[in-house]
Amino acid sequence: PPNIPVANVTAHLSQLQSIASANGGNRASGRPGYNASVNYIKGKLDAAGYTTRIQTFSGGSNLIADWPGGPTNQTIMLGAHLDSVAAGPGINDNGSGSSALLEIALTLAAQRPTVTKHVRFGWWGAEEQGLIGSRYYVQNGGSAGVEAYLNFDMTGSPNPGYFVYDDDVALQRLFNDYYTSIGVQTEPERIGDGRSDHASFKNAGVRVGGVFTGASERKTAAQAAKWGGQANQSFDRCYHSACDTYPSNINTTALDRNADAAAHALWTLAVGQSQQND
Ligand code: PHE
Ligand code: ZN
Ligand code: ZN
Ligand code: ZN
């Protein structure tokens, strides 16, 4: 699997910050900062050869991007919510996952590997209002043919933990294999069940996985011992706040590792390589 250059991911984050700053300080669903975020990502994907569509619903929209090729009845889908809360620009939550997926999509397009599965990406609207966009997508047939859904919500928390969703053991192991290869311990993500867009797919019977670096919960002393950072402080002290900004509220190491972990998972599932490089 390719190494995803974190400088490209942070360049997208910087653009999302600029979009928020130019649009009242947020990228909340249905507002101008959200629609500008969709247009930014869609423009890059269209130029790279993706088939994109904007799916509108009451209160917002989703951006769906298909990489041409592979059997659509065997689809691997990666998703991230693109909306912020109204209180701030939503850089860690969830510009981080959104920007990582964009760069992974662009890397796939640049490399053009032979795929054994169909690959699709989704950027969800109105997650912050209760997973509305992803649920709308699933309820309108979007999960048909999806063999696995991988979710990326908050992947660059400034005081990061390394949590891997435990919903499906094979997908959990896929991420853990990557983390083992770089010598980083993980913990199973349990508290998040039902709290992000993977729940929409899981409820429809799709296998789900993902990674997460923590929200307002505090890092324990044991977690600080294995991951570094600050014990007894929140993983993200700016969660759902005006200070969820770029660059101050992003840990670039965590952002990089999770982008690379996602690429490892996608290439293993859809390209069929199991070989590891950085
Ligand atoms: N969905 C939460 C939010 O956007 C964050 C979260 C992600 C919580 C993953 C748990 C697991 O606020
Ligand atoms: Zn990288
Ligand atoms: Zn949130
Ligand atoms: Zn979120």
Image (cartoon, rainbow, N blue to C red):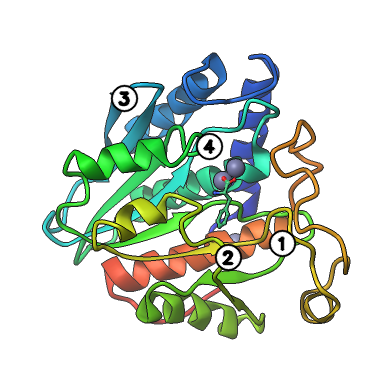
Q: Earlier in the sequence, mark 4 or mark 1?
A: 4
Q: Which residue is mark 4?
A: 128
Q: Amino acid at mark 4?
A: Glu
Q: Which residue is mark 2?
A: 191
Q: CA distance from mark 4 to mark 1?
A: 26 Å
Quadrant of the snapshot with the C terminus: bottom right
Measure the alpha-carbon separation of dots 3 and 1: 36 Å
In the picture, the disc for residue 253 is 1
Q: Is residue 217 above or below residue 50?
A: below
Numbered badge on residue 193: none
Task: Identify the secondary structure beneath mark 2.
Answer: loop
Q: Amino acid at mark 1?
A: Thr
Q: Secondary structure at mark 3?
A: strand
Location of ligand 3 given as a quarter of the image: top right
Label 2 near ligand 1 (CB < 8 Å): yes
Q: Regarding mark 1 in the picture, which secondary structure is present there? A: helix
Q: Residue 127 appears at what percent x and percent y? A: 47, 39
- Circle 3: residue type: Phe
Q: Which comes sooner in the sequence, label 2 or label 3?
A: 3
- In depth, the one of 267 and 197 nearer the eye is 197
Q: Residue at x 63, y 25 (%)?
A: 86
Q: Is residue 225 above or below residue 81?
A: below
Name the residue type under label 2.
Ile
Question: What residue lies at 54% left-to-right and 71% top-to-bottom?
Answer: 164
Does any atom of ligand 3 lie closer than 8 Å to the CB of label 4? Answer: yes
Whether label 1 lies within 8 Å of ligand 2 gets the answer no
Q: Nearer the viewer, residue 9 or 232?
A: 232
Instruction: Report the Cα–Cα distance between label 2 and label 1.
Output: 23 Å
Task: Look at the numbered disc 4 and give the secondary structure of its residue.
Answer: loop
Q: First in sequence: mark 3 or mark 4?
A: 3
